Image (tube, rainbow, N blue to C red):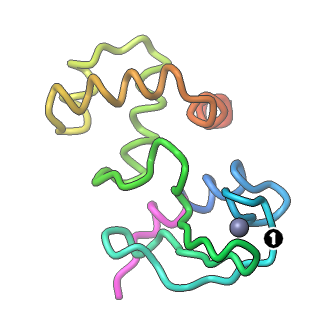
Amino acid sequence: MRRNSVETRCVEFLRTIRWPDGIECPRCHDKHIIEVGYIRTFPEHKRYYCYKCRYTFSDTSMTIFRGSRLSLNKWFDAIVLCTKGSSAMDIKNMLHVTYKTAWRIKHLLETDLLAQEIRQRLIK
Ligand SMILES: [Zn+2]
């Protein structure tokens, strides 16, 4: 299995922001969890199982990044781009996505609290 080292660093970065005190279940917030493999589209993203509520989740579950075909690396690029007052068209050209996707990304990044926290850490 091939893992992309840039994407691995991005997902590790996301983990430290989401779970500064260790990985916990996003549903019941219990820490009694185990790793159960990875996401098929992104093998760098791990999946977990919560013993308490039996919920299976991933590094991106319950975030704006969940189920996205874009890598976290691209999302983070978009987060940095948005700080510079870029338009949806700029995001479209930079990430090679459709205008509709670019517009959606821009809107999500402007309103999402986790994205704002990531932005603050990335531009430091
Ligand atoms: Zn749980």
Residue at image x 61%, y 62%? 12
Going 74% across and 66% down the picture, which residue do you hit?
A: 23
Q: In front: 12, or 28?
A: 28
Residue corresponding to mark 1 = 31
Q: Where in the image, quadrant-wise, is ligand 1 located?
A: bottom right
Q: Nearer the viewer, residue 48 or 121?
A: 48
Nearer to the camera, 48 or 2: 48
Kind of residue indicated by mark 1: Lys
Determine whether 74 is above or below 98 in the image. below
Q: In the rendered view, does 39 fall on the left or right side of 102? A: right
Q: Is residue 8 above or below residue 109?
A: below
Please state the horizontal and vertical placement of residue 51, each as a whole percent of the image. 73, 81
Q: Which residues are magenta?
A: 1-9
Disc 1 is placed on an element classified as loop
| Percent of width and height locating residue 78 | 39, 33
Name, please, the residue furthest toward the right: 21
